[in-house]
Amino acid sequence: MSLTAILAQSITEAEPLRALTLWQPWASAVAQLGKNIENRGWLTKYRGLVLIHAGASIDRRAVQQMPRDLEMPAKAVLAVARISDAHSDCDGRCSRWAMPGFHHWELADVVPLTEPVTVPGAQRLWTPKEALRRRVADALPANTSASFVAA
């Protein structure tokens, strides 16, 4: 079975899976620029697969700091990642993406989708419905890395 098939199976079956809606450009930064920390005002105990969803809102100040050619689709899942840990004790030194004074959710093994999967988002961690899980699995790239599935 290919790695993409294993990941797709994890997404579409009863494996724990959550989604997280981020303002742009942050969702695109996770999918395209290696953003490995999500800054939040609250900690999470959840560890596992998470769909990275771009909401409708835009952080205009942050856009000015991003590459001009960064694609920023809205209201769509852009990537699948794994929340590997969460902490609040690094004062922003754990990653260039970390902001002091926030809880830092560590995002690992990010796999950008081949195309955005349009869907409304929600606040906090939310549970994607089966139809969305299938659509995301269908949008996985053929060359999904082994580290993502092994984790």
Image (cartoon, rainbow, N blue to C red):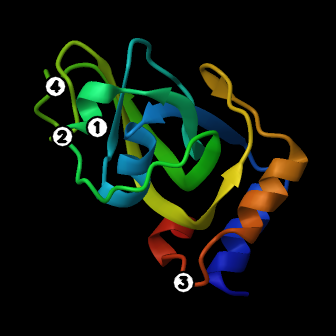
First in residue order: circle 2 vs circle 4: 2
Q: Quadrant of residue 92?
A: top left
Of the image marks 2 and 3, the number of the one nearer the N terminus: 2
Q: Where the N terminus falls, by quadrant?
A: bottom right
Asked whether the beta carbons under mark 2 and mark 1 sit within 8 Å of each other, the answer is: yes
Which secondary structure, mark 2?
loop
Q: Amino acid at mark 4?
A: Cys
Whether residue 30 is situated above or below residue 93 in the rendered picture: below
Residue linked to disc 2: 65
Q: Residue furthest bottom?
A: 1
**Label 4 secondary element:** loop
How far apart, in angstroms, are the residues tagged by discs 1 and 3?
30 Å
Q: Indicate which label's residue lies in the foreground, 4 or 3.
A: 3
Residue at (35% x, 48% y) in the render: 29
* Residue 15 visible in the picture: yes
Q: Is residue 9 left or right of residue 32?
A: right
Which residue lies under the disc numbered 4?
Answer: 90
**Can you identify the residue that label 1 sits on?**
63
Label 3 sits on residue: 143
Q: CA distance from mark 2 to mark 4?
A: 23 Å
